Structure formats: C-alpha cells, structure tokens
C-alpha cells in the first residue's frame, strides 16, 4: 500500500487522543469518571495497535483488512465522544469529515463511500440511543451534508487514483524510454565502427598471409637456437587469432564459421565447455607465457554442454581471459572455474589485477568505454552481447582478496540434445 495509508493509520489514533483530551472541556462531567479511560483503551489503543500491525506486517494477508477496520474504529470512537458531549450538536461530529478526508487521501472511491456509510449509521445509532432528543430535522440535515461531502470526496479520490496511475505509467514509460535510448546509443556506436571494422578485417586477412610467409622463412633459422620455440608458438597463435577474427568479421550473417576440421556436433548451436576452456587456455598460454592459469572444475564439468556455438564460446573465453592478462600487465596468476549451477553452467574468470573502481563498473559495458590506454572498449560489450543473445548472464565484480571476477552463466544442453 502507498505511504498515504501509513500516514492515515498513524494520524487517526493521534488525532483521536487529542479529541479525548479536549472532551472534558466540552462536558466537565467526564473529568471524574472512567469514561475517557475506557474510550481511549477501546478505540485509541486498538487503532494504534492496527497501525503497528500494518507497519510490521505490511503486504501480508494478516493486514489486508486493516485499512477497512481502522476507519470504522475511528468513527466508533468519535461517535462515542459525540454521544457523551451533546449528540448531533457535539463539536466532535465534525471529526466525521476528518475521517472522510483521511479516506480521500489513503483509499479509493469505494473506501470513501465505506467511511461515509458507516458515519451515517453511527450518527443515526447515536441519536437512537438518546431517543432522538435533538429532533429528526438536525440529524437529517447533518446526514445529507455528510453524504454530500462523501460524494465529493469519492470524486476527489477517483481523480487522485487516476493521477497516481498516470504517474506510475509515466515512470514506467520513462524507464523503458531510457533503456531504449541507451540501447540505441550502443547501436549507433557499433554502427559507426562497423565499416571501419570490415576494412580492418580485410586488411588483417591480407596481412596474415604475409606474416605466415615470413614465419616460414625465419622458422628454419630460429629452430636451431635455444629459447625460440615459445616465441614461435606465440607468434603462430597470434596469427591464428588474427585470421580467425578476420574470417568471422567478413563472414556473411548466419554463415557457419570456417573450421579446420568438421566437428561431431553442430558448432552453430552446441559447445563442449571443457574443450572450449582447454583451447582458450592453450591460446592464452602461448600468447602470454608469463601468465599461469589454474583450472578449477566442478563435478561432471568435463561433460557440460552449453547452448552456445563453439566459435562464439571460444571468442567469449578469449575476450575474458585476455582482459585478465592485460589487467595483470602480462604477468601473474589467473583462475578459470566452471561447473554446473542448476540448469546453467557457471563460469568464473579471476585475475590478480587492480580490479574495477565504482565508476568503471557502471560504464564498463558501454561500447567504446575503456580504462586502458590501448583498449578499444568493445571487448566486454561484445562478451555480454554474446552471452545475453544465448540466454545467459554476465556480471563483473571485485574479488574479496583483490583483482576482478567475471561471472558468466550459460544455459546447459542435455547430452541427447547435443547428439
């Protein structure tokens, strides 16, 4: 329920307590009796108890009738004070309008009519107890006036509700518009670099052929020297990455990625998590031998199949692990952990770098945003796009002992589906 209901529930017993304190001034006979104590105990404390019940157990089934019962208790309390201080001529009859006003600002039109109907019943019942000593005319006049005020209040409550709905819908539409604007801005940034990326990929493809020729020329001379095998392996891995990137960038949308050998599963839909992790670790180890990777596998992790193609799965892992390498300055200890988490495969990539500051965490997925001098700002953006396009989730956080932690959840595929 809204804040107006909370305020009305607490305002009712407080104002009633003030009325009880004023009652002896209207009827001095109440100063010496236990009437006031009884009235406070029955109506004031009961209403305060309802307010406390609502406060501590809000939105539970136990409290759904509190906004209906509370105004009735309030009207009974005011009606009792009115009977003890002059009936329909009592100044406490005006408190009925206070209850109607509370209903206008805390309930809807039905709530206002509920309070109005109970107010009329209590007025008639109070006069009946006194034998209608004040006459029918004054009672009828006050009833007509209360009903008129109730009708006006119901109309005001209806307009207030309509305004609240309009405000709520406006806020929801504003949030959706903000999300659409953010997505549109992302697409604009991506589209601006799209043509340049295609040109770069075409140039890389041509350069790869030249690099392979140079490697073939220098390889026989370097193989006889000690300590050159690791350098050659790293150079080959880098060239393979460039060629793979160029082919994937220039491929037609929806076309299967080129592969050296046919895979036993459909690479466009299924990927073996263990195979992808092993291949990504080999590539990163060859390219950055000073970073040592620790592999932590959960139960039956080697058999996990995810609903992501082999090429995008490898691309995702390489992006995340390369980011870790760059965060550690090319030297340190990285951890890749993966295993089953319900119907998902959970992947964690940890590093020993400086981690993320709060500003970076809020902007890190924006295309073009980077914290590195030589970064492009598209790695994590593409990684998240890959994961979310396949029904997964990617989150970033700082590790408890330092460094960054990237968490990825990808939907699992059963073995029979993979076959």
Image (cartoon, grey):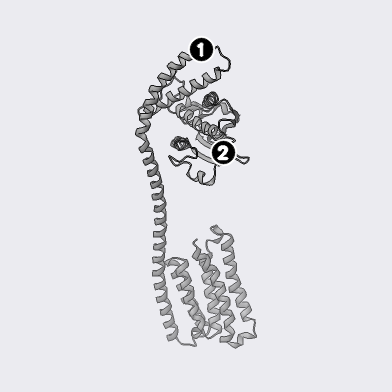
342 in relation to 18, above or below: above
Q: Helix or strand or loop: what does disc 1 sit on? A: helix
Q: How far apart are marks 1 and 2 (CA)?
A: 42 Å
240 in relation to 22, above or below: above
- Quadrant in the picture for residue 354: top right
Q: Which residue is drawn at 54% across and 44% down?
A: 357
Using residue 157 as the reference point, say whether residue 278 is left or right of it: right
Using residue 193 as the reference point, say whether residue 412 is left or right of it: right
Give percent across and percent down for residue 358.
53, 46
Give percent across and percent down for residue 75.
52, 75
Give percent across and percent down for residue 260.
44, 18
Q: Which residue is drawn at 54% across and 82% down?
A: 83
Depth order, front residue of 1/96: 1
Give percent across and percent down for residue 307.
47, 31
Specify whether residue 413 is in view: no
Depth order, front residue of 76/278: 278
Residue 65's tag is none
- Which residue lies under the disc numbered 2? 404
- Which residue lies under the disc numbered 1? 221
Depth order, front residue of 99/400: 400
Q: Helix or strand or loop: what does disc 2 sit on? A: strand
Using residue 32 as the reference point, say whether residue 323 is left or right of it: left
Between disc 1 and disc 2, the foreground one is 1
Q: Tag 2 or tag 1, which sits nearer the N-term?
A: 1
170 in relation to 268, above or below: below
């Amino acid at each position: 329920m809204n804040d107006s209901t909370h305020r009305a529930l607490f305002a009712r017993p407080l104002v009633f307590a003030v009325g009880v304190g004023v009652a002896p001034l209207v009827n001095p006979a109440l100063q010496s009796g236990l009437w006031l104590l009884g009235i406070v105990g029955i109506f004031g404390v009961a209403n305060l108890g309802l307010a406390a019940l609502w406060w501590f157990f809000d939105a539970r089934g136990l409290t759904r009738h509190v906004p209906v019962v509370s105004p009735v208790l309030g009207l009974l309390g005011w009606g009792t004070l009115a009977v003890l201080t002059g009936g329909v001529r009592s100044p406490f009859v005006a408190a009925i309008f206070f209850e109607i006003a509370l209903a206008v600002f805390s309930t809807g039109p039905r709530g206002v009519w509920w309070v109005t109907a109970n107010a009329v019943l209590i007025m008639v019942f109070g006069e009946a107890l006194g034998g209608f000593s004040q006459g029918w005319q004054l009672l009828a006049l006050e009833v007509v006036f209360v009903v008129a005020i109730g009708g006006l209040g119901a109309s005001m409550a209806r307009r207030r509700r309509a305004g609240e709905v309009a405000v709520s819908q406006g806020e929801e539409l504003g949030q959706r518009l903000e999300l659409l604007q953010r997505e549109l801005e992302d697409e604009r940034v991506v589209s601006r670099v799209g043509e340049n990326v295609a040109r770069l990929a075409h140039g890389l493809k041509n350069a790869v052929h030249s690099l392979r020729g140079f490697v073939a020329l220098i390889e026989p001379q370097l193989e006889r020297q000690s300590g050159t095998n690791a350098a050659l392996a790293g150079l080959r891995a880098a060239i393979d990455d460039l060629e793979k990137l160029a082919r994937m960038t220039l491929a037609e949308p929806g076309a299967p990625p080129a592969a050296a050998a046919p895979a036993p599963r459909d690479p466009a839909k299924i990927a073996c998590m263990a195979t992808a992790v092993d291949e990504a670790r080999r590539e990163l180890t060859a390219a950055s031998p000073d970073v040592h990777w620790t592999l932590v596998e959960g139960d039956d992790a080697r058999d996990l199949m995810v609903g992501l193609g082999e090429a995008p799965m490898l691309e995702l892992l390489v992006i995340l692990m390369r980011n870790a390498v760059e965060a550690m300055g090319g030297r340190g200890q990285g951890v890749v952990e993966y295993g089953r988490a319900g119907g998902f495969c959970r992947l964690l990539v940890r590093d020993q770098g400086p981690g993320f500051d709060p500003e970076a965490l809020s902007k890190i997925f924006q295309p073009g945003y980077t914290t590195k001098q030589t970064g492009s700002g598209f790695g994590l953006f593409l990684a998240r796009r890959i994961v979310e396009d396949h029904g997964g989730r990617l989150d970033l956080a700082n590790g408890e002992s330092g460094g960054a932690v990237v968490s990825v959840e990808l939907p699992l595929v059963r073995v029979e589906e993979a076959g």
